[in-house]
Amino acid sequence: MSLTQLLGIDAPIVLGPFGGLSSVDLTAAVSNRGGLGSYGLYGYSAERIHDTIGALRAATAKPFAVNVWLPTGDEVTPSDVDLEPARHALEPLFEAAGAALPEAPARFLPDPAEQLEAIMDAAPAVLSLVFGAPDPRLVETAHHRGIRVIGTATTVAEAVELEEAGVDAVVASGAEAGGHRISFLEPADRSLIGTFALVPQVVDAVRVPVIAAGGIADRRGVAAAFALGAAGVQVGTAFLRTNESAATEVHRRAIAGATDTDTVLTRAMSGRLARGIPNRAMREIEKAGVILPFPAQNWLTGVFRAAATRSGDGDLVSLWAGQAAGLATRDAAADVFDELAAGLPEGSGGNPA
């Protein structure tokens, strides 16, 4: 079965799910164009998940995916960490953002089980997962509700484990991709395999459709992905630059001005390895050398990042972007989609709606 038949879409183009930067407008725009729009639900409560899926259904009658992070088992709780050294080290950034130093919360993240239960209740067309392989019982429940499940791998071994868990398709995410490196079998810094090397090896190792991700921003990247055996592509940075995304204007400008060497891998912003464009916050946190484990660091920086987002200060937010940022040249989601669709091989779908 082709990826388009599997997911009920017209073109095998998937929007990368942006945790914290997703928007209903962009998700709907990609789905309405014939691809699979995706919405990242990182940090969302069950109630907010229900509301968001309702808003997505109101914006598009086409299939869309929602994405959650699976727990890896090494997440810390407020009682596990001493926040004071990091609070002290980051105080200049809080002051610059006009944000007060926060007190420890009751918990850093919603209960993953509550998130997944809300998703099962709402029954979107597709559930996509990062940072792990799902329990086969979760996949069985999803299938019973008519939900397709997509897992995400950064190595061949991860792809094999995902297939064994019963997922319907695997995203092979190369090291070029922006945002978090979602490795789960080995440390992320030992799982940095480029898209060009990763995709064909994953294709050879699993029977389910493989979706190529990382470094794809135009028709050339799409054509290359299919030449490597991919059944579809997932694109993040090129869509993140568009007016429909939830990225701030300063974030869009940073992507527009980035070159091939302007992204780095860092743990500064969240405690987990991620690719983005360096700014004051990233540099000062790394210089201070005080980085809490995930999700404590993500929660702590999130306080001043939220204030900086409201004020439009690009030096104090996470400027996630991939190595193909220099190819992200279009402001409208429809234009990005049409450019990508032009690289699809004949018979794979992709005529713009």
Image (tube, rainbow, N blue to C red):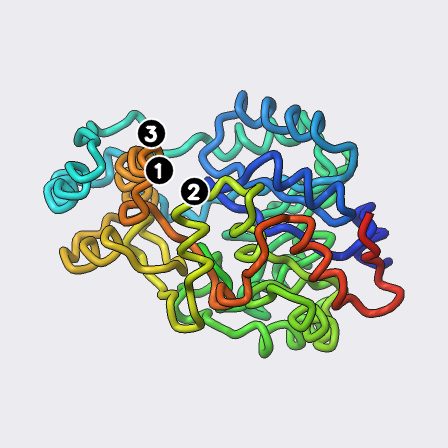
Secondary structure of residue under mark 3: loop
Q: Along the horizontal axis of the image, is 95 left or right of 39?
A: left
User: Is residue 23 or residue 111 the one in the foreground?
Assistant: 23
Q: Amino acid at mark 2?
A: Thr
In the rendering, which numbered label is found on residue 107?
3
Label 1's element? helix
Rounded to the nearest whole Å, what is the CA distance between mark 1 and mark 3?
Answer: 23 Å
Q: Position of residue 218 (x, y in %)?
A: 64, 66
- Tell me which corner region of the image, top left, top right, bottom left or bottom right, holds residue 79: top left
Q: Position of residue 247 (x, y in %)?
A: 46, 44
Query: Real-space Cα distance between discs 1 and 2?
Result: 7 Å
Nearer the viewer's eye, disc 3 or disc 2? 2
How crowded is the residue under tag 3: few (<14 C-alpha within 10 Å), some, or many (20+)? some
In-image side of 179 versus 105 (left or right):
right
Give the vertical position of 280 relative to 302 (above or below).
Answer: below
Say which residue label 1 marks.
309
Task: Name the residue beneath numbered marker 2.
Answer: 248
Residue at (39, 47) in percent of width and height: 250
Disc nearest the viewer among 1 and 3 = 1
Q: Amino acid at mark 3?
A: Arg
Q: Quadrant of the N terminus?
A: bottom right
Return the disc, 3 or 2, that comes first in the chain's sequence.
3
Labelled pair 1, 2 in contact (Cβ < 8 Å): yes
